Amino acid sequence: MQISEKDRELLALLSENARMPVAELARRLGLSRTTVQARLERLEGQGVIAGYAVRLSDAYERGLVRAHVMITIAPKALSQVTAELNAIREVTALYSVNGPYDLIAIIAAPSIAELDRLIDRIGELSGVERTLSSIILSTRIAR
C-alpha cells in the first residue's frame, strides 16, 4: 500500500487530534474539504486508519503507575497466554520479542499495590514460566 506525503501529514494531524473537523484538516493541509474526505475514506478502506481512539490527558497518565513485564512462556502456550493477557484491561500493549523473553507486556495501574497485584496475576497465568518487571519512572520521548 502506498501513501503520499500529504497522507502522512494527514495522519500526523489525526494523531494529534483524531476529532479534528475535516474542514480544519483541509485548511491545515492546503487541500479542499472534499479531497481530504476522499483521502480519509481511502485510508480507512485500505486499513491504514483502523479506527479512532481516545487520547488520555497527561495529568491522568502521570497518575498511573506503569511497568514493562517481560514474560517467558512455555512452548506452544503463546495463543493461550496472549488471550489471557488480552482479557486483562490494564495490559495496554503486548509485544512479541526475541531474546531470553518471549513477550513484553506494558501495564498501567492506579497504584503500586494494584501494579503488584497485576504482576502476580500475570505470573500465575497458565503457560507463563517466568516474569521480570521494570516500573517506568518517567517518559522521555513519546510520539
Image: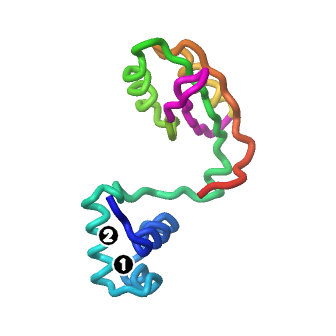
Q: Which residue is mark 2?
A: 40
Label 1 – label 2 distance at C-alpha: 9 Å
Q: Quadrant of the C terminus?
A: bottom right
Relative placement, left or right, of 10 versus 112 is left
Q: Residue at x 47, y 72 (%)?
A: 9
Residue 112: percent from left, percent from top: 69, 32
In the picture as drawn, the residue positioned furthest to the front comes out as 2
Instruction: Please state which of residues 125 and 57 is positioned toward the viewer in this rendering.
Output: 125
> Compared with residue 66, is residue 104 higher up or lower down, i.e. above or below?
above
> Compared with residue 79, is residue 96 higher up or lower down, i.e. above or below?
below
Q: What segment carries the magenta color?
A: 95-111
Relative placement, left or right, of 141 versus 34 is right
Q: Residue at x 64, y 35 (%)?
A: 67
Q: Quadrant of the N terminus?
A: bottom left
Report helix, strand or loop for mark 1.
helix
Residue 30: percent from left, percent from top: 43, 87
Residue 52: percent from left, percent from top: 39, 59
Report helix, strand or loop for mark 2.
helix
Contact check, label 1 and label 2, Cβ < 8 Å:
yes
Q: Is residue 99 magenta?
A: yes
Q: Please name which of the two marks, 1 or 2, marks the residue nearer to the observer.
A: 2
Residue type at tag 2: Leu
> Compared with residue 29, is residue 95 higher up or lower down, i.e. above or below?
above
Q: Which residue is mark 1?
A: 22
- Mark 1 crowdedness (10 Å alpha carbons): few <14, some 14-19, many ≥20: some
- Mark 2 crowdedness (10 Å alpha carbons): few <14, some 14-19, many ≥20: some
Q: Is residue 133 magenta?
A: no
